[in-house]
Amino acid sequence: MSTQSIVSVIIIFKNEERFLRDAIESVLAQTYQHWELILVDDASTDKSTQIAQEYQERLPEKVRYLTHPNFENRGMSASRNLGIKNATGTYISYVDGDDLWLPNKLEDQVAILSKNPEAAMVYGPV
């Protein structure tokens, strides 16, 4: 079993069909591989739901797909909170459904947190 910290990556989305696949792929391309991906669907009406479910089916050990009860639209805060509630990692990181990460983002941030245990968070310009 690895002693490296797990990062719970949370992507919330609603109708991000155009960008969601690229956002997910930017997580899959991370040089730091000790992560779980939580996809929180805030009642999408486009093909975002199918895209997210496809990744969960393809990578069930790494990717989970969640929705609010009754597939309700609850908003960004409630969606992030749902992701946090289901996270199992030591750290939590967010990427929006229409954003991309550079491949070394998690590796760099986990290294900073590991070297600075007094730090509560790491952030950078977006």
Image: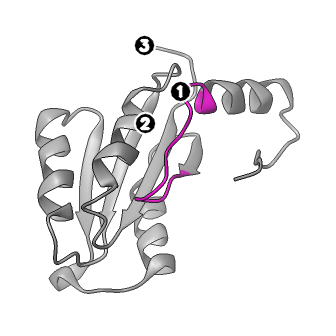
Number of labels in the image equals 3
Image depth: mark 3 or mark 2 in front: 2
What numbered label is drawn on residue 103?
1
Q: Is residue 40 magenta?
A: no
- Residue 23 on image: x %, y %: 39, 47
Out of 76 and 84, give the one closest to the viewer: 76
Residue type of the residue flagged with mark 2:
Ser
Instruction: Name the element at disc 1.
Output: loop
Q: CA distance from mark 3 to mark 1?
A: 24 Å
Which class describes the residues within 10 Å of circle 1: few (<14), some (14-19), or many (20+)? some
- Residue 112 on image: x %, y %: 79, 29
What numbered label is drawn on residue 1?
3
Q: Counting residues from the N terminus, which is met first, the one under dot 2 or under dot 1? A: 2
- Residue 95 on image: x %, y %: 51, 53
In the image, taking residue 79 as reference, residue 55 lies left or right, namely left
For the residues labelled 3 and 2, say whether their Cβ atoms are less than 8 Å apart: no
* Residues rendered magenta in the picture: 94-106
- Residue 97 on image: x %, y %: 40, 59
Residue at image coords 48%, 60%: 84
Which class describes the residues within 10 Å of circle 2: few (<14), some (14-19), or many (20+)? some
| Scheme of image coloration | one colour
Q: CA distance from mark 3 to mark 2?
A: 25 Å
Position of residue 43 relative to residue 84, above or below, is below
Residue under pointer 2: 26
Which class describes the residues within 10 Å of circle 3: few (<14), some (14-19), or many (20+)? few
Residue at image coords 51%, 78%: 77
Q: CA distance from mark 2 to mark 1?
A: 7 Å
- Residue that lies at the very extreme toward the top in this rendered image: 1
For the residues labelled 2 and 1, say whether their Cβ atoms are less than 8 Å apart: yes
